[in-house]
Amino acid sequence: MSDLKNIQFSQSSVDTYDTCRLKFKKIYIDNIKWSNDNQNFGSEFHLLAQRYYIGIDEELNQGREDYILFNNLKKFLKREKDMYPEYNIKYKDDEISLLAKVDLIKIEKGKITIYDWKTNKSKFDRSKMEKSYQTKIYLHNVAEKFDVNPKNISLIYYNPRFDNYIKIDYSDTEHKYNKIEIKNKIVSIINEKNFDQKIGKHCSFCQFNSICNQQFISVDCL
């Protein structure tokens, strides 16, 4: 079994652990991957957004699903200087290693804004988003990497399906709590000995369902 201390944790790996420890083990310890895991509409939209914010303009066929969504995004946030799409923010200390893969970051003097695109067919649940490890890890890593006061850091989630967003601000107090919570969480995963299967609705969308439950799924739903 791989040494969990060598794993660079992300919100995806932490969420996977909380969803099903067996799935976490297969992906992050046994290194079992599916080649088509990320070939879905969401990843295609993120690629369009990345290309736009690095200066590549694309004319989409109006019949494509992402035509309206992509236009909504461009109206919501026009391309400007000091914007960096698909930006990796790393954090490491003696105990844990964390990676935040942000869709876009805007770095201004004394102020940083993180953007994340969501293409879910459900509207935002602010309470759920504020408590998510994605929010906590993104804000934590930015505060640790950049010389900027946490109160001047914010995270904006935007869903082009509804042309809707939520903005989550940060603070010194939240950062102190975040550091403790995140470290405790990662250390508990590193020290975990039992990676048991957790059966639930998530199994219907899991690539290992055929192994665990003898039920096959289409990779299109992943």
Image (cartoon, grey):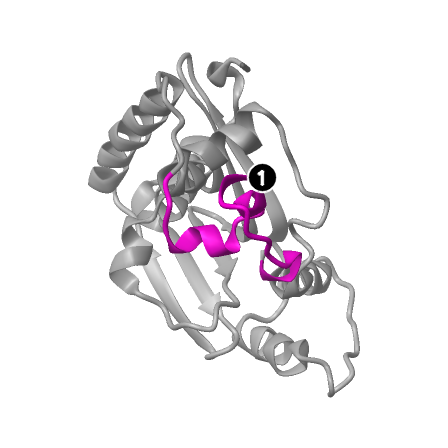
Q: Is residue 148 visible?
A: no
Q: Residues within 10 Å of mark 1 (few under 14, many from 20)?
A: some
Q: Is residue 184 visible?
A: yes
Which residue is located at x 51 percent, y 77 percent? 161
Seen in the picture, residue 64 relative to 24 is either above or below; the reply is below
Which residue is located at x 63 percent, y 75 percent? 70
Q: Secondary structure at mark 1?
A: strand
Q: Which residues are magenta?
A: 198-221
The residue under label 1 is 88
Seen in the picture, residue 125 relative to 211 is either above or below; the reply is below
64 vs 86, left or right, is right
Q: Quadrant of the N terminus?
A: top right
Residue 164, percent from left and from top = 42, 75
Question: Can residue 212 be found in the magenta stretch?
Answer: yes
188 vs 55, left or right, is left
Three-letter amino acid code of the residue under disc 1: Asn
Which residue is located at x 65 percent, y 49 percent? 37
Residue 200, percent from left and from top = 36, 51
Residue 188 location, quadrant: top left
Residue 204, percent from left and from top = 48, 56
Residue 130, percent from left and from top = 29, 54
Which residue is located at x 36 percent, y 39 percent? 18
